[in-house]
């Protein structure tokens, strides 16, 4: 389930209609929640971050730019591109700490590597990179990133407005315009 699934799920649950809102990114997940049915979602776009500086060398000129930070999951497979940022993994509190779990770097490879592929069911810690042995799957997932990127709305970050500072409004966040 993804945050984009809440809208269609709640509209359907309330007896509303989604006519005129199609296509949506989300799915009605109520049968999944209430009846334990399989989710209609088969893929999940984690992110496409065009604001992080590109990393490495573009692998395929006609597919999604692997220098761009992005991640997508389809079924059990997850593809990560670009500079993934901090790749360390911290185990949950209930897991015993050992040198093999605490603080290990998850994403490894050369300093210029910008593509990783993981089977997150078999490897939930994302430690075994399959990108070099499953090139066809890497290309398929890059095609899906291309698809999503083609419909993306560019981010807009207006300049900071000093009037928004809560100190100017009795220490409270609220409307200032």
Image (spheres, helix red, strand yellow):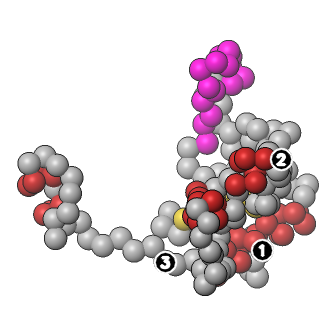
Residue 94 at least partly seen: yes
Q: Give the range drawn in magenta.
A: 87-101
Q: Do the residues under discs 2 and 3 have CB atoms within 8 angstroms? A: no
Residue 83 - label = none
- Percent of width and height locating residue 120: 79, 44
Pointer 2 or 1: first along the chain: 2
Residue 154 - label = 3
| Secondary structure found at label 2 | strand
| Prevailing SS of the magenta stretch | loop
User: Residue at the location (86% across, 39% down)?
Assistant: 122
Against 147, residue 98 (above or below) is above
Q: Is residue 149 magenta?
A: no
Residue with the mark numbered 2: 119
Q: How far apart are marks 2 and 3 (CA)?
A: 30 Å
Residue with the mark numbered 1: 143
Front residue (pair 52, 121): 121
Residue 69 at least partly seen: no
Front residue (pair 13, 62): 13
Q: Does the magenta stretch include residue 90?
A: yes
User: Residue at the location (78% across, 47% down)?
Assistant: 35
- Percent of width and height locating residue 89: 62, 34
- Percent of width and height locating residue 119: 83, 47
Q: Distance between the residues labelled 3 and 1?
A: 19 Å
Pointer 3 or 1: first along the chain: 1
Q: How crowded is mark 2: few (under 14 residues within 10 Å), some or many (20 or more)?
A: many
């Amino acid at each position: 389930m993804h945050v984009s699934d809440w809208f269609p799920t709640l509209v359907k649950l309330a007896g509303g209609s989604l006519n005129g809102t199609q296509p949506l990114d989300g799915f009605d997940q109520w049968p999944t929640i209430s009846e334990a049915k399989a989710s209609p979602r088969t893929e999940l776009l984690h992110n496409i971050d065009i604001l992080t500086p590109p990393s490495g060398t573009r692998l395929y000129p006609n597919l999604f730019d692997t220098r761009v930070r992005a991640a997508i999951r389809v079924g059990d497979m997850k593809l990560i591109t670009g500079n993934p940022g901090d790749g360390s993994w911290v185990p949950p509190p209930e897991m015993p700490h050992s040198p093999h779990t605490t603080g290990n770097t998850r994403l490894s490879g050369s300093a210029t590597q910008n593509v990783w592929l993981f089977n997150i069911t078999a490897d939930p810690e994302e430690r075994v990179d399959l990108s070099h042995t499953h090139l066809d799957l890497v290309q398929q997932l890059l095609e899906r990133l291309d698809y999503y990127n083609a419909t993306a709305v560019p981010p807009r970050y207006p300049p900071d407005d000093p009037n928004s500072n809560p100190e100017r409004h009795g220490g409270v966040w609220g409307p200032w315009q």
